[in-house]
Image (tube, rainbow, N blue to C red):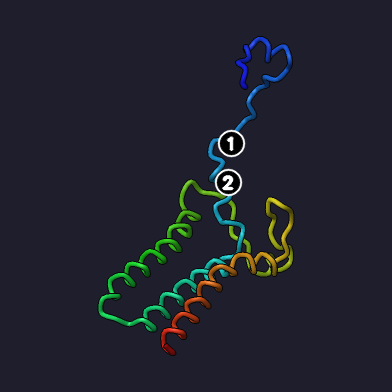
Amino acid sequence: MSDRFDRELLLARGEVVAAPEADQRPYCKNRNFGLPPALLLGSFACFFAYLGIMWVGFAADGLVLPMVVNFIFVAAFAFVPAKWATMKPAHRDRAIDMAHFRAVGIETETGRTPAGEAATLVLLLPACILFWGIAMTTIAALV
């Protein structure tokens, strides 16, 4: 099923090579997510709008604390990456502006993605969650 190979055998076959040089902190190369801040703010605006719709649509005394906790979590999910992008050590990368984003799009693992497709990919899930909340609130109001 599996065989143990000796190091000498692997060296003789040329399968042992030197490890590639790794960056000291590869996770700190690009901390701006490669997107304009407007897209990220739009996605969090959809999440806040969803929570607001749920709070208004299902208003009850027992939901005050859970909704406050939800708002705090969504705010933290927005604030922590924004703060991380501006933390030390200093870096020269800045988030791209919307004009540059529209002109060239973004580079992804599968190739260049035009701005419209990238914006659709970023905002699709938050928009679906928002519309789901509108639909559920509407159904609950009509039933």
Label 1 sits on a secondary structure element that is loop
Q: Nearer the viewer, residue 121 or 116?
A: 121
Residue at 62% across, 11% down? 6
Amino acid at pointer 1: Asp
- Check contact, mark 1 vs mark 2: CB within 8 A: yes
Reading the image, the residue beneath label 2 is 29
Q: Earlier in the sequence, mark 1 or mark 2?
A: 1
**From mark 1 to mark 2, how far is it between C-alphas?**
9 Å
Task: Answer with left or right where residue 55 lies relative to residue 94.
Answer: left
Quarter of the image for residue 14 reads top right
- As rendered, which of 135 and 113 lies closer to the eye? 135
For residue 33, above or below residue 51: above
Q: How many marks?
A: 2
- State the residue in front, 33 or 17: 17
The front one of 14 and 4 is: 4
Q: Quadrant of the N terminus?
A: top right
- What residue would you read off at disc 1? 23
Kind of residue sitting beneath label 2? Lys
Q: List the single residue furthest toward the left.
A: 61
Query: Which of the image's four quarters has the C terminus?
Result: bottom left
Residue 137 pos. (x, y %): 44, 82
